[in-house]
Amino acid sequence: MIKKIFFLSTILILSNTVFSQGYKITIKIKGLKANSTCLLANYYADKNQLKDSAKTDKNGVMVFKGKNILPNGIYLLVTPDHNYFEFVISNKEQEFTLETDTLFDIDNFVIKNSEENRVFFDFNKFASQKSVDFEVLKEKMKFAKTKKDTLKIQAQYRVIDSLIQDKRKTLSETNPTLFISKIYRSFIDVPTPEPLRKPDGSLVDSNYKYNFYKNHYWDNIDLGEDGLLRSPVFHNKLKYFFSSVFVQVPDTIIKETDKLLKKIETAGAKDLFRYSVSWITNHFEDSKIVCMDKVLHYMGTNYYCAGKTPWADTAMVRKMCEHIVKIRPTLCDEIAPPITNLFDSTYNKQIDLYSINSPFIVLIFWDHQCGHCQKSMPRLNVLYDSLNKAGLKFEVYSVYTQDDWAGWKKYLKDHKLKYINVANMYGTSTYRRNYFFISTPQIFILDKDKRIKLKGIDVENLPNILELLYKDEKLNSHKKK
């Protein structure tokens, strides 16, 4: 059975970080066979980095030695059978000894010459004892018969959790200079003051608690400490902040990104800055939420292509800069680029995008041989009728992207597509320069001013989206009045 203490572990990856002094970590595991190869690793965000390896002598003693200082972090000793325990290394304590047995019993650890690990294992012992109390409560919960019984047990859960939080806080306050205290402080939420109220008792600001929590989320986290990255703490805090703390709207994300990165940059934590820039960029590039390429565009423009990512190689930066140029014209909230020189299936009637006058326009790029398109286009035809009759007025500007003209015309006839259908049969339209997409169908929702409201949606979501857009338009018109 794999044993662990304090944090969760994942996979091991090789680290190439270079530092400038030396370390000597002696670990004795009673009962471990001689000549056993053990690994020294550290956390790195949600993964682990392999740092060193050593063999045991006949007494189960191994020594990890190196000429370069090991940076602040939570480290792991991994045995050949993949059991492990965790401990702390700080740049101020590079030579110490830990002793235990093969059970890694928390009560049997012996620590020599390491104040960091004395505090670390002090907390672990306390948390281990409280985990036993948690298990007892879990068993009691199984037999709770009434709501009163359940509430009583839940209150006991909260008491134990509060005791654990208090223990972390006490240890961090009594050992303020230790690296592990920074870890413990990062678990402490900033208390929210009572919001101001009007004489009638109503809130002055109904969003006060939300804004306070968002604005003070990072208060107890030392954004100048790169060692937080060598623990699961910073990654988990970062992920939660950008996934759950505020509404997932591109402009809000961009604002909060800038605030955080400026704090980290000012504090001087280069590893945290690098990781945060990379994680935020990758996270929102992979996001399934519509319009999030606006965040990618911002990160590319203001960080990668602005020379603020020296760790990124030239090819990567060039690729990023080329990509943001491609996506810039069709970011959400931008005016859609004009589309001209496209003709309908008679080959005689030119219909330009800007010639359409409608409260909303569904601009769709498609190919009749695309499997998804074959399902989407007839469905769009049905919605075109039903939604317009229901008062959700919109027009469709359907652009065929390939050059099988006979096949395109046959598809239009067979499926009786009623909306505007155009194609570039004369090769004179340059819409491809401004509209970047790699798959079809690709949908953009434009308002009456040809501003891109949404994109990358499915036809099936069109009824709900149009309904929301009409409500939003109505609300905005009332505000203007």
Image: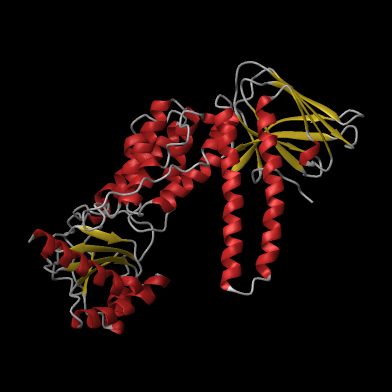
On the question of residue 360 being in view, the answer is yes
Q: How many marks?
A: 0
* Residue 173 screen position, x and y as percent: 55, 31
Location of residue 123 with respect to 22 vertically, above or below:
below
Location of residue 62 with respect to 187 vertically, above or below:
above
Way the structure is coloured: secondary structure
Residue at 43 percent of width and 39 percent of height: 218
Residue at 63 percent of width and 39 percent of height: 48
Q: Which residue ends up furthest to the left in the rendered image?
A: 481
* Residue 304 screen position, x and y as percent: 38, 35
Q: Is residue 406 left or right of residue 231?
A: left
Q: Quadrant of the C terminus?
A: bottom left
Q: Which residue ends up furthest to the top in the rendered image?
A: 21
Location of residue 249 with respect to 360 vertically, above or below:
above
Q: Residue 291 occupies which quadrant of the picture?
A: bottom left
Q: Is residue 271 left or right of residue 115?
A: left
Q: Is residue 462 left or right of residue 287?
A: left
* Residue 114 screen position, x and y as percent: 70, 24
On the question of residue 327 being in view, the answer is no
* Residue 238 screen position, x and y as percent: 47, 43
Location of residue 87 with respect to 128 vertically, above or below:
above
**Viewer-proximal residue among 376 and 294:** 294
Q: Is residue 384 left or right of residue 283?
A: left
Residue at 43 percent of width and 42 percent of height: 190
Q: Which residue ends up furthest to the right in the rendered image?
A: 58
Q: Residue 273 occupies which quadrant of the picture?
A: top left
